[in-house]
Amino acid sequence: MTDLDPVIHAQARLRVVATLSTLGDGDRITFPRLQELLAMTAGNLSVHLRKLEDAGYVDVSKTHRGRTPATLIRLSRRGRLAFEEYTEAIRSLLDPTSPKEQS
């Protein structure tokens, strides 16, 4: 049986990573926009982003747009790879006869 990445597997973090994976390489999203898309509270989103950041799966940068502070988030290369591996593990669980699993 394939192990699922516990960092990504939590429902809220899976939603975050899946949403970030739709961005192009190097593209970033603002914290309020991500919060809006996911319908999460700021505190809840912050906790899950911290866990993903600690694992190296997301990059969070703080900057200013004019005089307004802005927090920008993107999926890191490591995060993108981890999500690809996670989705492949899910596929293999759903279809254990897939060619990758046969030896």
Image (cartoon, rainbow, N blue to C red):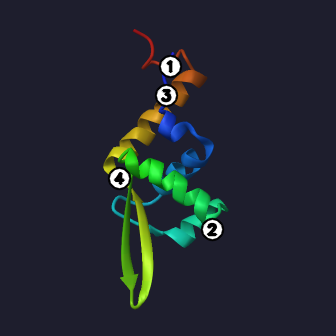
Residue drawn at the location 45% of the way across and 16% of the way down = 101
Q: Which residue is mark 4?
A: 76
Q: Which residue is mark 1?
A: 98
Q: Nearest to the eye among marks 1 and 2: give it.
A: 2
Query: Which three-letter amino acid code belongs to the residue tagged 4?
Result: Ser
Q: Which residue is mark 3?
A: 89
Please tell me which of labels 1 and 3 falls first in the chain. Answer: 3
Which residue occupies the extreme bottom position in the image?
A: 67
Q: Which mark is residue 1?
A: none
Label 1 to label 3, Cα distance in Å? 11 Å
Query: Which three-letter amino acid code belongs to the residue tagged 1?
Result: Ser
Label 4 to label 2, Cα distance in Å? 21 Å
Relative height, residue 36 to residue 15 (above, below): below
Please tell me which of labels 4 and 1 falls first in the chain. Answer: 4
Q: Which residue is mark 2?
A: 36
Please tell me which of labels 3 and 2 falls first in the chain. Answer: 2
Crowd class of label 2 (few under 14; some 14 to 19; many from 20; radius 10 Å): few
Crowd class of label 4 (few under 14; some 14 to 19; many from 20; radius 10 Å): many
* Label 1: element kind: loop
Crowd class of label 1 (few under 14; some 14 to 19; many from 20; radius 10 Å): few
